[in-house]
Image (cartoon, rainbow, N blue to C red):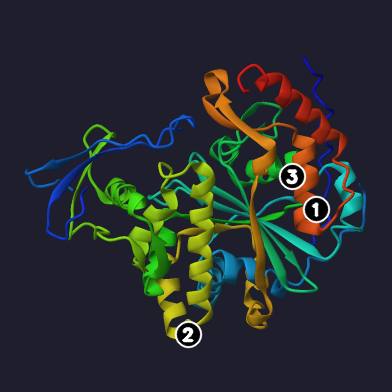
Amino acid sequence: MATAPKKPVKKKPVKHGPERTAKKKTVRYEEYEGYEEYEDFDEEPVVKKKKAPAKASKKKKKKKSSPLKIVLFIVEIFVLLAMVVVLYGVLKGEKVGHYDIKEEEIVINPAVEEKIETTMKGYRNVALFGVDSTTGALDKNTRSDTIMIASINQDTGECRLVSVYRDTYLNLSNDTYNKCNSAYAKGGPKMAMNMLNMNLDMNITDFVTVGFAGLRDTIDALGGVEIEVTEAEIKHLNNYQISMVGTTKDGVNYEANAGTDYTPVTTAGRQTLNGLQATAYCRIRHVGNDFQRTQRQRTVLLAIAEKAKKASPATLNEIADKVFGEVYTSLDLPEILELLADIGKYEVVDQAGFPDMDMLSTGNIGAKGSCVVPLDLTENVAWLHKFLFQDNDYTPSEQVQGYSEIIKSDTSKYIN
């Protein structure tokens, strides 16, 4: 058994960066939110028609990078949600979900401190979380259904977006190993950011979290988004709509009225999806696999970005009215007020998933269930730094090398 690596010292970080009918029918959906076996991606959920009506180091602290530089991830990447909501809150004297993170609570691997001044200089890295919540529980005790890192080159305006697969087997930041989305459920955004920093040699100090309701309301306020839906996705898209708006007695079987509670998608092809439909589309896991699922999430976010760029002030105000209270962020209110210029400068130039497809495996890791396993965490982290920062010679930290050995030891007997 590998020896656990020495845990990084918590330093003050340097900040830089089918039911396919339009007629009103009540359908029943057996929820399948548990983690699927990756060997059986095409497993179908049980959906039944029902005639009965439904029921309802001691370094000088550096000044934060200009907040204007982080407008990309807010406007182009995460639905413009944080900027609009926080700005709206300031102007109206109301309070949004703000998380005040103490710098000493953020863990950054010591070797990364040096990189902040060299290959990582000029980049701002922000964590984006989409949580499995329809009731406004955004701080913790809810799974991070979506985990992304937006890395912005502040000099060129280029942004790269990375989805961290939620089932990835990693150190949760407390020297226990499990699916990485457990970190948010156990310790909220602080623990989730530390998990990303420790395992991936990152320097993330800010985050934005949005629940299902925030995503749905934003898309509706923008008038929907254009998405290419395949024939195979229709059934699952509608099933997820039912699970989000339907009623249930046992927590497993859901009922909802087609045409009233939700609008079924009935045909394949490029079409405008409303907020509920697009959110359901993001959640599809049984067409392809969890890797394709994260691609769907990025597709929706980029479609939102295109709509947000063209939105009028009246539309932005409508978004603010609807999503107020559905966003949780570490960003300071004065910072957000400065995010009002140069939006057109920023552009998403590439996107990917972590671990890299050529360096991962999947399997049931004992009681942890079905996980995505980085075959060699150090190689994956080296690839990540090349992708984000064009660092072709990156050597992962001592901490990452130690976590990598533990992951290999824990998982080798379960995967091929």
Q: Nearer the viewer, residue 145 or 394?
A: 394
Spatial separation of the CA atoms under disc 1 and disc 2: 39 Å
Residue 148 drawn at (x, y percent): 61, 52
Residue 285 drawn at (x, y percent): 43, 43
The circle drawn on residue 197 is 3
Kind of residue sitting beneath label 2? Pro
Res 214 → quadrant: bottom left
Give the mark, 1 or 2, whose residue is nearer the N terminus: 2
Residue 154 drawn at (x, y percent): 77, 70
Asked if disc 1 and disc 2 are in contact, CB closer than 8 Å, the reply is no
Q: Would you say residue 202 is visible in this rendering?
A: no
Residue that numbered label 1 is attached to: 386
Q: Residue at x 45, y 59 (%)?
A: 326
Residue density around tag 3, few if under 14, some if 14–19, many if 20 or more, within 10 Å:
many
Residue that numbered label 2 is attached to: 313
Quadrant the C terminus occupies = top right
Q: Is residue 328 left or right of residue 358?
A: left
Disc 3 element:
helix
Q: Would you say residue 354 is visible in this rendering?
A: yes
Kind of residue sitting beneath label 1? Lys
Residue density around tag 2, few if under 14, some if 14–19, many if 20 or more, within 10 Å:
few
Q: Is residue 384 left or right of residue 228?
A: right
Asked if disc 3 and disc 1 are in contact, CB closer than 8 Å, the reply is no
Q: Nearer the viewer, mark 3 or mark 1?
A: 1
